[in-house]
Image (cartoon, rainbow, N blue to C red):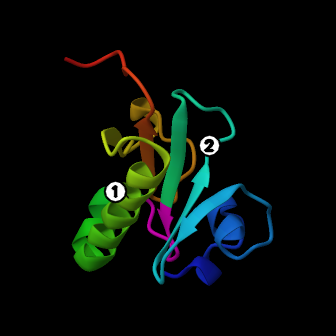
Amino acid sequence: MTSTDSPDCLFCKIVAGEIPADVVATSDTAVAFRDIAPKAPVHVLVVPKEHYPDVPAFAATDPAGLASVIGLADGVASELADGQYRLVFNTGPKAGQTVFHVHAHLLAGGELPGFA
């Protein structure tokens, strides 16, 4: 399923340029933009340009695309933070996923509480 197959998807609209976002990096297959409600000094969402509902569907269908998302996240962390970061994929509403277009939350920029 491509982004054009999901006309009501918020992230598909951002990828298509229909909704503005604070884009910090792009690749051939992914876009990274600042989260509008940051939970860390650096909080960037990294989304594939193609629409997948969650990370298991993305990994099963396009493992190279998943690697590309992770590579873009790593590059953003190197540029905006010290290269140390947390990368989180929420899968399902009970896990906190509110937009059902797979996306990684890149969190960085200081001590990140919550996990040991």
Residues rendered magenta in the picture? 47-53
Question: Does residue 49 show up magenta in the picture?
Answer: yes
Q: Residue at x 54, y 27 (%)?
A: 39
Q: Which mark is residue 20?
A: none
How far from the left and from the top, in percent, is residue 104?
42, 51
Quick check: 43 above or below 32? above
Which residue is located at x 30 percent, y 68 percent?
66
Give the SS element for disc 1. helix
- Residue 41 x, y percent position in the rendering: 54, 30
Q: Which residue is mark 2?
A: 35
Horizontal and vertical percent position of residue 8: 71, 65
Question: What is the residue that sits farthest to the left in this orientation?
Answer: 116
Task: Name which residue type carries label 1.
Answer: Asp
Question: Dot 1 surroundings within 10 Å: few (below 14), some, or many (20 or more)?
Answer: some
Marks 2 and 1 in Cβ contact (< 8 Å): no
* Mark nearer the viewer, 2 or 1: 1
Is residue 14 rendered to the left or right of residue 28? right
Pick whichever of labels 2 and 1 is earlier in the sequence: 2
Q: Which mark is residue 74?
A: 1
